[in-house]
């Protein structure tokens, strides 16, 4: 469903009843705005974004903001007294950490700055409660996992405690929701299996010549790097790895990087590259740009080479790249769209912006100028070729492009890894193409997750594209076989190996997959299988499989498949009440196609989040995509004010036209309050049918009242005598009191209070006030 939605479902009732007042959400930097937008749009939970400019000794940020979302990479750095101000602020009722596996520790006593910060909050009593979100809680080391768990309860979890003792307590703290088992409240599965279609293509002679030359360049660079210092060798290898990845994406992508490197050697590096070297924080999104930025910082004089006589090798490579006039990978993508996804919206992923531009140019030429949008880390795409031969730059905000794609205004969306997480694209799209394959299989899962999530109504179809003659493709083929063996091992004991695979992938050591692909370049094809087996002997081995089984076996899960007697109600059932509340305040709400527009009652305008008027507000999740103002439900400040206003009414008697029998609504409450002074209440009703008086639950009363919506109510009691009503109420109360034990309400000392009596109107005065 997505972590933000899961968090919102947890937070909404806690915030609505006042159990949480101060909330701190810590996320990766690129997801801060996404958390803020999603919680506001879907739950009306409004978070202030933490910025370093707002956090000064004079601003007193942490004492003036009660609901905050912050970048953990920013907050973990203790600059300018930042931690002192945070740790001296009032306690947080709830702290949520996204991607919590980044909070890590090892046996040598080394801890990430993020983990140290969270430990300080916990030790100083600044966290009343905490939720950690992660798809990979165990990174292969028990010490790191138990260090993470210690944030939830340091008295129960500590790396020095015996494993068996902590495992026994783990189910109280670990919740794992498997996508394959997720159901709605009627037991229907929410997700279908993903359909995979592997597709291949062949290089042209020019592409093959370039790939061969590029492989030789990488080998020569690796040999040269072995003669350098450790620091220099690391920088050279970083660039070589990036070049190899670019070459496996498109010739255009790697050619751009080679030309940039050539310009640097000639002393013609652009002002942009010079500015990169002066930056204190990495501003780039492409892996190659990041590698060059790192290099620029460490080699400001430009003395480190990739190999001996690098300039000559670069010239040969660039000449070979320029000889490539047609990229068969891009041609194959167009063929697949026409044959497999004709007329359908398609999400396409590439790791690099130059490949993005190449693909966008091809899609514009084939399908028209307004058919495609893009997402990358810069919100800008250079080098797009139009059919008339002009080269242009495209710009677009990530949120605007996603909205256009979801609304059907564009058919195609091309995304780099910047779109691999934090966005929802499932509303009308179920087709995905991996234009190139990332070296880390985890990224494939993140890409597919943009479509295979809550709200998807179709089977998601995924195409992966590769050239079987390349080393990268051969390694991918062997990786897939290895992953298949891992899933078989998991499936022998559990029925959800696809979901569990993510846990296994998360246990791979940092850099494992990069080392695998880079190392394969040195290996002759006839020895590749043996070499691969030796390099992956521990990946997904018995230890990892056992760890996954142990974790899952000691985790709770939300399983609604066996849920019974669920009230058949949803948000639309609140609409008649809300309309009535507006009308009771002299407003005339306009309802069209399930979307409500109105002017807000003056009495409700006491909160900064409440607008003076609303257009197209909806009580139906299926209308949310087209609704301007979003979803409304319990917890929304508008509905809160309607409920509060109704709660202040005294008991009401109404005479209803064409009502078949009386209806009495009672409030059952507990005379004894809980420890938090919360009064527990539940509504029950008494109706009269052919068998006599009958008690019904609160949700049944709501259904009955909604069916009465629109009937005329009058102060004219007709021929009814007061004592007749009083006698009926006494009998109805007696029936309700006798029936209370059968309702199994959690009340120590229950008491009943009349709220509403609806009585059939025998004679209706058409001139009476309604």
Image (cartoon, rainbow, N blue to C red):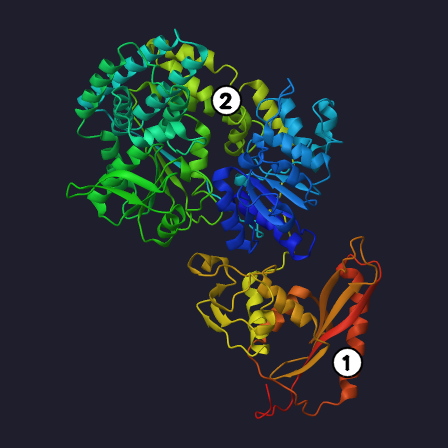
Picture coordinates of residue 336 (x, y %)? 27, 38
Q: Is residue 745 above or below residue 545?
A: below
Mark 1 or mark 2: whose residue is earlier in sequence: 2
The answer to whether residue 704 is left or right of residue 465 is right
The percent coordinates of residue 229 (x first, y second) are 43, 9
Instruction: Say if residue 707 shows up in the picture.
Output: no
Q: How many other residues sit within 10 Å of disc 2, few (<14), some (14-19) or many (≥20)?
A: few
Write down the residue under mark 1. Answer: 728
Q: Nearer the viewer, residue 26 or 582?
A: 26
Question: Is residue 505 visible in the rendered structure shown here?
Answer: yes
Query: Picture coordinates of residue 329 (x, y %)?
Result: 26, 31
Q: Residue at x 53, y 53 (%)?
A: 40
Camera-nearest residue between 340 and 69: 69
Q: In the shown orientation, is residue 423 left or right of residue 431? A: right
Q: Is residue 650 above or below residue 323?
A: below
Residue 334 position in % (x across, y down):
24, 38
Please report the residue visible at 17 percent of the width from the left and 42 percent of the height from the top.
390
User: Left or right of 557: which side holds 415?
Assistant: left
Q: Label 1, label 2: how many angstroms apart (C-alpha)?
A: 74 Å
Which residue lies most toward the top here?
Answer: 227
Task: Give the labeled residue for mark 2.
Answer: 510
Identify the image quadrant of residue 210.
top left
Q: Which quadrant is home to the C terminus?
A: bottom right
Residue at figure coordinates x 32%, y 53% from the top left: 409
Task: Count neighbours of disc 1 (C-alpha within 10 A) and say few if under 14, some if 14 to 19, many if 20 or more.
Answer: some
Q: Residue furthest left?
A: 388
The residue mark sitting in front, 1 or 2, is 2
Secondary element at tag 2: loop
Q: Quadrant of residue 416?
A: top left
Q: Kindly identify which numbered label has been placed on residue 138.
A: none
Position above or below: 133 against 563: above
């Amino acid at each position: 469903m997505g972590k933000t939605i899961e968090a919102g479902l947890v937070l909404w009732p806690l915030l609505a009843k006042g159990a949480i007042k101060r909330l701190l959400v810590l996320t990766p930097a690129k997801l801060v705005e996404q958390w803020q937008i999603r919680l506001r749009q879907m739950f009306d939970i409004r978070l202030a974004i933490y910025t370093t400019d707002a956090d000064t000794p004079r601003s007193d940020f942490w004492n003036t903001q009660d609901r905050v979302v912050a970048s953990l990479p920013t907050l973990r750095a203790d600059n300018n007294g930042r931690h002192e101000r945070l740790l001296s602020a009032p306690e947080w009722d709830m702290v949520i950490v996204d991607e919590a596996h980044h909070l890590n520790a090892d046996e040598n006593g080394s801890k990430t700055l993020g983990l140290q910060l969270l430990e300080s909050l916990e030790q100083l009593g600044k966290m009343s409660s905490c939720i950690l979100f992660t798809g990979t809680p165990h990174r292969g080391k028990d010490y790191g996992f138990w260090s993470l768990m210690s944030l939830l309860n340091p008295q129960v979890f500590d790396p020095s405690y015996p494993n068996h003792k902590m495992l026994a307590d783990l189910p109280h703290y670990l919740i794992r929701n498997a996508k394959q088992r997720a159901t709605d409240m009627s037991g229907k599965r929410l997700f279908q299996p993903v359909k995979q279609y592997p597709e291949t293509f062949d290089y042209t002679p020019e592409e093959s010549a370039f790939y061969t030359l590029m492989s030789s360049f990488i080998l020569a660079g690796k040999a040269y790097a072995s003669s350098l210092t450790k620091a220099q060798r690391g920088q050279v290898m970083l660039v070589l790895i990036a070049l190899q990845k670019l070459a496996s994406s498109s010739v255009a992508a790697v050619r751009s990087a080679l030309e940039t490197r050539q310009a640097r050697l000639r002393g013609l590096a652009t002002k942009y590259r010079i500015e990169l070297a002066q930056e204190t924080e990495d501003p780039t999104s492409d892996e190659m740009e990041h590698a060059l930025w790192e290099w620029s910082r460490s080699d400001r004089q430009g003395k480190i080479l990739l190999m001996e006589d690098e300039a000559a090798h670069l010239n040969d490579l660039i000449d070979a790249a320029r000889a490539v006039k047609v990229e068969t990978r891009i041609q194959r993508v167009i063929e697949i769209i026409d044959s497999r996804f004709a007329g359908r919206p398609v999400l396409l992923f590439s790791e690099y912006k130059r490949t993005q531009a190449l693909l966008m140019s091809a899609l514009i030429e084939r399908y028209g100028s307004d058919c495609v949008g893009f997402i990358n880390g810069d919100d800008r795409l250079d080098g797009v070729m139009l059919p008339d031969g002009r080269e242009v730059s495209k710009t677009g905000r990530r949120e605007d492009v996603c909205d256009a794609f979801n609304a059907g205004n564009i058919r195609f969306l091309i995304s780099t890894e910047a779109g691999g997480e934090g966005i929802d694209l499932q509303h009308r799209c179920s087709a995905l193409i991996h234009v190139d394959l990332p070296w880390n299989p985890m990224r494939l899962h993140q890409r597919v997750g943009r479509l295979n999530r809550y709200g998807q109504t179709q089977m998601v179809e995924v195409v992966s594209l590769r050239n079987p003659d390349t080393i990268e493709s051969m390694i991918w083929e062997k990786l897939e076989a290895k992953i298949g063996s891992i899933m078989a091992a998991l499936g022998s004991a559990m029925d959800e190996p696809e979901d569990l695979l993510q846990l296994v992938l998360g246990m791979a050591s940092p850099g494992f997959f990069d080392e695998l692909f880079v190392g394969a370049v040195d290996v002759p094809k006839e020895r590749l299988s043996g070499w691969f087996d030796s390099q992956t002997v521990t990946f997904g081995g018995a230890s990892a499989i056992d760890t996954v089984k142990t974790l899952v076996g000691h985790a709770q899960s939300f399983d609604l498949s066996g849920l019974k007697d669920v009230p058949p109600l949803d948000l639309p059932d609140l609409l008649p009440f809300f309309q009535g509340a507006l009308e009771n305040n002299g407003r005339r709400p306009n309802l069209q196609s399930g979307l409500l527009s109105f002017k807000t009652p003056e009495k409700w305008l006491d909160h900064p989040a409440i607008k003076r008027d609303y257009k197209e507000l909806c009580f139906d999740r299926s209308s949310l995509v087209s609704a301007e103002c979003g979803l409304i439900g319990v917890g929304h400040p508008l509905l809160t004010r309607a409920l509060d206003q109704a709660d202040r009414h005294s008991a009401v008697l109404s005479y209803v036209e064409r009502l078949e029998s009386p209806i009495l609504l009672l409030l059952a409450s507990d005379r004894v309050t809980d420890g938090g002074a919360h009064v527990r209440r539940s509504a029950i009703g008494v109706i009269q049918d052919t068998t006599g008086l009958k008690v019904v639950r609160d949700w049944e009363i709501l259904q009955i009242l909604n069916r009465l919506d629109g009937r005329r109510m009058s102060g004219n009691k007709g021929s009814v005598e007061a004592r007749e009503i009083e006698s009926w109420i006494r009998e109805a109360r007696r029936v309700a009191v006798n029936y209370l034990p059968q309702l199994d309400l959690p009340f120590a000392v229950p008491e009943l209070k009349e709220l509403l009596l609806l009585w059939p109107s025998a004679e209706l005065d058409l001139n009476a006030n309604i």
